Amino acid sequence: MSAVTESTPTSTQGTGPKPAKRKGLNHGQGRLGLLLVAPTLAFLAVIIIYPLLKAVQLSFQKDSGLDPATGLFVEGGNAGFSNYTHWLLQQCGDTACPPGTLGAQFYDAFWVTIFFTVVSVVIEVILGMWFAMIMNRTFKGRGLVRAAILVPWAIPTAVTAKLWYFIFAYDGIANRLIGIVGIDPQLWTSDPWAAKFAIVIADVWKTTPFMALLILAGLQLIPGDVYEAAQIDGASKWQTFRQITLPLVKTPLMVAVLFRTLDVLRIYDLPAILTGGAGGTTSLSMLVIKQIRNGFHSASALSTIVFLLIAVVAFLFIRFGGADVVQRPPSSKKPKKRRRDKDENTDKAVSNAVTGQYFGAN
Amino acid sequence: MPLITMRRTAAISGVLAVALTVAACGSDSSGGDDAAQQGADSRGPITYVQGKDNSNLLGPMAERWNAAHPDEKVTIKEQSDQADQQHDDLVQHFQAKDAGYDVVSVDVVWTAEFAAKGWLTPLKDKFALPTDGFLEPTVKAATYNNTLYAAPTSSDGAMLYYRSDLVKTPPKTIDEMWSMCDIAKKNGMDCFAGQFAKYEGGTCNATEWMNAYGAKVVDAQGKPTVDSPEAAAGLKALADHYKSGDIPKQAITYQEEQSRASFQDGKLLFLRNWPYVYNLASTDASSKVKGKFAVAPLPGVSGPGTSTLGGHMAAISAYSDHKATALDFLKFLTSPEEQKTNMEKGSLAPVIESIYTDADLVKKYPYLPTLQESIGNAVSRPVTPFYPAVTQAIQDNFFSAIQGQKTPEQAVKDMQAAMQAAGG
């Protein structure tokens, strides 16, 4: 968001006459910049900051309880951290949450969400890379292949889920197909393991094109001459891939992985429609939605927990995973300057500043 | 730079969606009796809110009412066809104390929750509604804390569909039914199925089986009493016969439609389902069982079993400005004429007993006497303001028990504990 990056140089300027290396904005320009982004910031405050803070505030209130005398609900009052301990320490009142309560499902939901994330992202990276390499070649009908690969991504998730629901029905195509090779029909939407893989399969089918597209964008930025040089040096295909393609495509790849990871951590519609949470496929987001009907203060606490989880994962990715989301594409900077090292350092500084600011705000 | 936008969006939007919903629910929920008692004499135009009308009943109904009440016209607001969405829509309008929702259609299982929140006008004193001639279970389901809160408008009860070409006399008891499973085996069919997936239908089926064996899920005060040998016996019967194959493996993925499809394809000997199946199985072009099936009351341990009660009621919002008109409207909705029309045009089971013996109707709908017996014996799902948590407790533990992941005894014990945790 331009608002954030622009505000970084502005704020360094405000602190004093430190030499602003980057673009030499003078004082008036900085103020104008701030003025120009102010509407955006105000808008973000209303649609993001306020609901976020309100949700956190709600999470510290008790859900309304029943007054046994009148049979009517009364407000619950201040809850302290009890809504959080309810989920994290599995406390339902004074006892541990019995099976069949939503509270008892928290860690199951947590781990299954992590499972979905790890398994589907790994598969998507491998398939996506493969698709992208195919699409990156020059061959007849390339446009058609590119368009065809994108089709699953263009279908709304709810429709995808319903589609796979029919495929995975007991009398559906999936069981017919595995029947041909002599495997017994599976309960794809209820069996604990089959249901998990049904969701992974549907998710991979739907989002690999997205991964492939982002990787393809990265591949196209690699200049052809490095490949020619490798060819002349007699590098094998595997060596070329390991030593040239992979390092050069790493940044866009990590960004794609970050996006997908955050996406799957929030997964809701696919399991909700495909399995309805049967077979232990209730994701964290599904648990939040179910809890809203039982009491939204507790649901607020849970959604805050999910938010923090996602924020931590995003932070780790950006800090240590090399998902340098604010780095400008290499093509735009290379021709301009040859002072590579310096440029990269600056970029890193900006990225850190932004990261710090963004997560500091939360 | 747009990359950052996307990252922010990615990181936040899911949580944000929740946060927005949650924030939108932020108003306090105490309506109280004050609002409920006001406006007992006020008349004027009203709005009737109901889920999607698939049979075109609402329009003509409103015309009939409006013709008779030109100064107190009713406006219809149709909601979506999803029960969850209807529920949430009502909750949001109640929380906003919206006077625009005068009369609302409420699913049987929501009545207690809405009543306990103080959103419904109690139908007593000035608002008393006569319920003579109504099927008793429907009135019971509309009652919370010994007060009637809604007028039952349509009912529903499950029946046993059986293949009359293969089974001459339908089974009266559960054991009789299992003994007939040989017939299914001989014909290469599955024997019995209901709706055993993990959803609201699973709760309906599970409570039916527990009730059939003499269990009570909650007592008269709404306290959970499900941890009993009877309830365990009900679940055990299901789990045992699921294991033995009398109930097909895929039945735990069945909702209403999948089980109907199996029966219509001639793959199932006995099906537990709602009355809507009758017309479809007799008229659907793809139905392979036309004229080869009939209905019977659900079997019990030593006689007819007990169905779970379904259906809808109409209630007056505590925030309505024209409650006198609203009350007249409830009486209109529950009048024999309207009930009969709904049965004829929309196959909605009436709440008035006498309609079930109407000679013309019985001729047209041969299942009516069976349905009357089913609803007459029906047991409502637990009437509790914590219904969402209670149904969750039943579904989860029933689903584990039928698959043999936990013993029936453990399952009812956990059910009880989970219900208690919810009500605490």
Image: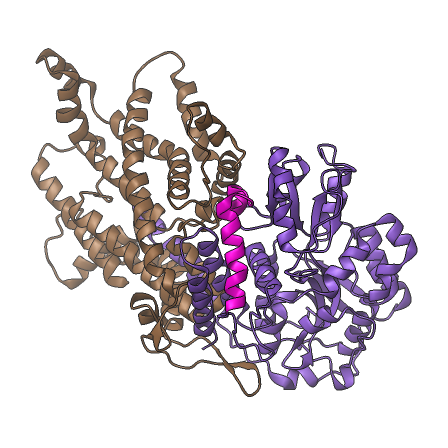
Chain colours: A brown, B purple
Give B121 or B68, whichever is nearer the viewer.
Answer: B121
Taken as a whole, is the magenta stretch helix, strand or loop?
Answer: helix
Stretch of the chain drawn in magenta: B229-253
Residue A49 placement: quadrant? bottom left
Q: Is residue B151 above or below residue A124?
A: below
Quick one: A141 or B242, which is closer to the camera? B242
Q: Is residue A232 covered in magenta?
A: no
**Magenta-colored stretch includes residue B247:** yes
Q: What is the count of numbered marks? A: 0
Left or right of B125 on screen, residue A362: left
Residue B34, image x, y percentages: 64, 86
Please give the name of the residue rendered at 36% of the width and 67% of the height, measured from the top-left corner.
A301
Q: Is residue B52 visible?
A: yes
Residue A203 in the image: x percent, y percent?
Answer: 39, 39
Left or right: A308, with B226 as reference point: left
Residue B155 at x, y percent in the picture: 73, 61
What residue appears at the point 70 percent right and 71 percent down from the top-left corner? B315
Closer to the camera, B274 or A317?
Answer: B274
Residue A3's x, y, as percent?
Answer: 31, 53
> Viewed as shown, does residue A63 lie left or right of B89?
left
Whether residue A29 can be seen here: no
Give the quarter of the figure containing the C terminus of chain A.
bottom left
- Seen as rendered, the residue at the extreme bottom is A69
Q: Residue at x 23, y 58 (%)?
A: A357
